[in-house]
Image (cartoon, rainbow, N blue to C red):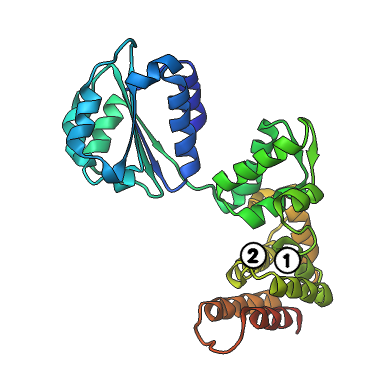
Amino acid sequence: MNEKLILREIENKNFQPVYFLHGEEPYFIDLISNALIKNALEEHEKEFNQSVLYGKGTDHLVLINELKSFPMGSEKRLVVLKEAQDFKKIEDLCSYFENPNPSTIFVICHKYKKYDSRKKSLKLIAKQGQIFLSEKIKEYQLNEWIQRYVTSQGFTLNSKATMLLGEFLGNDLGRIVNEVEKLGVIYPKGAQIDEKHIEENIGISKDYNLFELTNAVAAQDIHKAYKIIHYFELNPKAVHLPQIVSSLFTFFSNVLKIHFLKFSAREAIAKELRVHPFVAGELSKAKSKFSPKKLAFNMEVLQDYDLKSKGYGNTTSSQADLMKELIFKLLNP
């Protein structure tokens, strides 16, 4: 069951005795656990019937006592175990999972990594409650997720603003949500958010960023590329060399794929490469500027500079110098 269906069940007061929320993406775990805290009990019931514990400092016998206690002045009790990745005795709770207290809602928040599905505890919870695996959004899905989220908050977002957010914030969904919430305080519902709004309120330059550097390389505009690199040199926190390498490697590998596709329609290319149609159009333009041989050469160069960025084969050059060298090699025959 995905997070939307689980949230709908919670809002309809259809609760499970145990929720095991685990995985690499903390945002969805927080989303579901916060929904349970909001909906499981009325405000006046929480003082005596809600317990929030933390994995590192919780004794499993104390936890079991909380789970087996009966509610006071309420039909349910809510017990939330946060940071469960630091709780080392989940398997010691198997006897409880076999026969959970029907008046207790037990929520386990195991963040940043997947719990071993072969463990007995998960097999028991699967029979008695709800298991949710919170996975990271894939890179090719990120822009679409940002668009959907912003739309759900009552705004629209143009393509460039979407890509700026994705490039700058990565797939840290919690951070994306926080930044969009800031925009929601400033602009009225229904507003269209563009790259200027992003620059003014989130601190991402609309002219000097990873997205614009990739565009400059795609257009073989070495002057503009060097201007952006100079900005990065003056603002070392803006972008790091490994990010540049990753972005350009993705760009060149996608252009190389387009060389061997049997179709040229933008929408078909977007579907094949799993990118936004706007991106597909920009990639198609770059096809005529870079031959397959040059693309393969550039990808080898990027692999070399990926190693240099991590200290292999480089002892003297600064990150800015490496960026300049990289751009020169990519844009010269």
Point out the residue furthest to the bottom here.
Answer: 316
- Quarter of the image for residue 124 reads top left
Amino acid type, mark 2:
Ser
- The residue that appears at 20% across and 37% down in the rendered structure is 60
Q: Nearer the viewer, residue 298 or 39?
A: 39
Residue occupying the point 65% across, 43% down: 146
Query: On screen, 15 above or below 83?
Result: above
For the question of whether residue 22 can be seen, the reply is yes
The C terminus, quarter of image? bottom right
Q: Secondary structure at mark 1?
A: helix
Towards the viewer: 21 or 60: 60
**Residue beneath label 2, please?**
247
Which image quadrant: the N terminus?
A: top left
- The total of numbered circles placed on residues is 2
Answer few, some or many: residues within 10 Å of disc 1's Cα (few below 14, many 20 plus, some between 14 and 19): some
Q: Is residue 1 visible?
A: no
Check disc 2 and report its element: helix, strand or loop: helix
Residue for point 25% across, 44% down: 118
Residue 251 figure quarter: bottom right
The reply to whether the C-beta atoms of the residues labelled 2 and 1 are less than 8 Å apart is yes
Q: Is residue 97 left or right of residue 294?
A: left
The residue lying at 48 percent from left, 16 percent from top is 12
Question: Which of the 4 image quarters holds residue 285?
Answer: bottom right
User: What residue is shown with label 1?
Assistant: 214
Query: How far is mark 2 from mark 1, CA to CA?
Result: 7 Å
Q: Callout 2: 10 Å neighbours few (<14), some, many (20+)?
A: some
Question: Whole-percent x and y of residue 218?
Answer: 77, 68
Q: Position of residue 200 (x, y in %)?
A: 78, 51
